[in-house]
């Protein structure tokens, strides 16, 4: 059985306290908080003050997903606000083409108009870094340690077009790997089946590095979280069979007529 982490991106922000209470009563395990900066992804969502509001009104594990540039500048604020786990994107630390010194946007600025409407093609995303040498690994590891020393669990997220092999040098230090099953930045997108193969690859990479896969962080287990297009039925079943153990669901939960039934069906 996987843990369920409903995303408040799909909640009614005018009634956020009651929306979080709904998922807690309905059997959710975590509450997932999507943070977007308008740069790394085109949309802008929320900041640390909202996490500070959420923490005292729920007993759920607070799972914060930073889709932002320069996450190291903001991580201390999010942890101080009450984040239990902070995940940031590997692609935020991608080198500019032909450089090992300068970091750049994950997509070329010429594609920004498409990004504003969520119309990026898979080819646009596949043009970004493919191997660990395309990223500032030292800075990524330092940011992971910043999360841990600040008192939270640390996760890394990769986009559908980023290969699992890019995680090889950092997987020993992580508490969680978040695999995007849609391109980041917009809710309600269609699930990309390519993530199923990537789950298997993460499991294999974890084992090769002496890590057991699971959600008991106190035992040093590595959690595998999926975000994007998760829904009850075949998708949820396939994800769990492949080895995913934390499922983020936004519209599939908050858009359901019966939230408790939706969470139960994704879990069981």
Image (cartoon, rainbow, N blue to C red):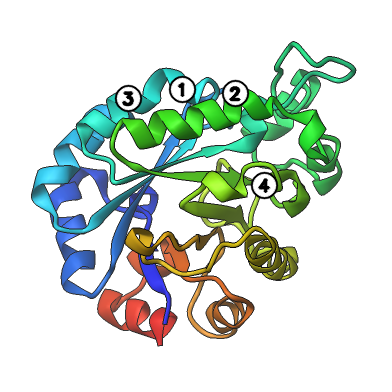
Helix, strand or loop at label 2? It is: helix
Whole-percent x and y of residue 107? Answer: 74, 28
Give residue 72's mark. Answer: 1
The image quarter containing residue 100 is top right
Q: Nearer the viewer, mark 4 or mark 1?
A: 1
Determine the residue located farthest toward the front in the rendered image.
Answer: 210
Q: Tell me the tag on residue 159.
A: 4
Q: Is residue 42 visible?
A: no
Where residue 139 is drawn, which disc sits there?
2
Q: Earlier in the sequence, mark 4 or mark 2?
A: 2
- Above or below residue 13? Residue 220 is below
**Given contact means CB atoms under 8 Å apart, are the residues at marks 1 and 3 in contact?**
no
Tag 1 secondary structure? helix
Distance Cα–Cα, label 1 vs label 3: 8 Å
Mark sitting on residue 76: 3
Distance from disc 4 to disc 2, alpha carbons, whole Å, reads: 19 Å
Residues 84 and 228: in front is 84
């Amino acid at each position: 059985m996987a843990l369920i982490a409903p995303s408040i991106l799909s909640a009614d922000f005018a009634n956020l306290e009651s929306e979080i209470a709904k998922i807690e009563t309905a059997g959710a395990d975590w509450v997932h908080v999507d943070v977007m900066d308008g740069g790394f992804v085109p949309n802008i969502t929320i900041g640390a003050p909202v996490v500070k509001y959420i923490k005292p009104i729920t007993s759920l594990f607070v799972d914060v997903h930073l889709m932002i540039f320069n996450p190291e500048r903001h991580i201390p604020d999010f942890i101080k606000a009450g984040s239990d786990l902070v995940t940031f994107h590997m692609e935020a630390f991608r080198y500019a083409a032909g450089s090992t010194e300068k970091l750049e946007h994950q997509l070329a600025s010429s594609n920004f108009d498409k990004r504003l409407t969520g119309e990026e093609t898979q080819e646009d995303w596949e043009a970004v870094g493919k191997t660990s040498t395309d990223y500032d690994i030292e800075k990524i590891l330092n940011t992971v340690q910043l999360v841990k020393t600040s008192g939270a669990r640390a996760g890394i997220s990769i986009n559908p077009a980023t290969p699992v092999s890019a995680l090889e040098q950092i997987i020993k230090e992580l508490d969680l790997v978040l695999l995007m099953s849609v391109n980041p930045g917009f809710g309600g997108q269609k699930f990309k089946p390519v993530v199923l193969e990537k789950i298997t690859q993460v499991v294999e990479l974890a084992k090769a590095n002496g890590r057991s896969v699971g959600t008991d962080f106190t035992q040093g287990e590595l959690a595998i979280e999926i975000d994007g297009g998760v829904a009850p039925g075949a998708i949820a079943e396939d994800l769990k069979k492949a080895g995913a153990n934390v499922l983020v669901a936004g519209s599939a939960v908050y858009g359901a007529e019966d939230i408790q039934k939706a969470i139960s069906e994704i879990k069981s």
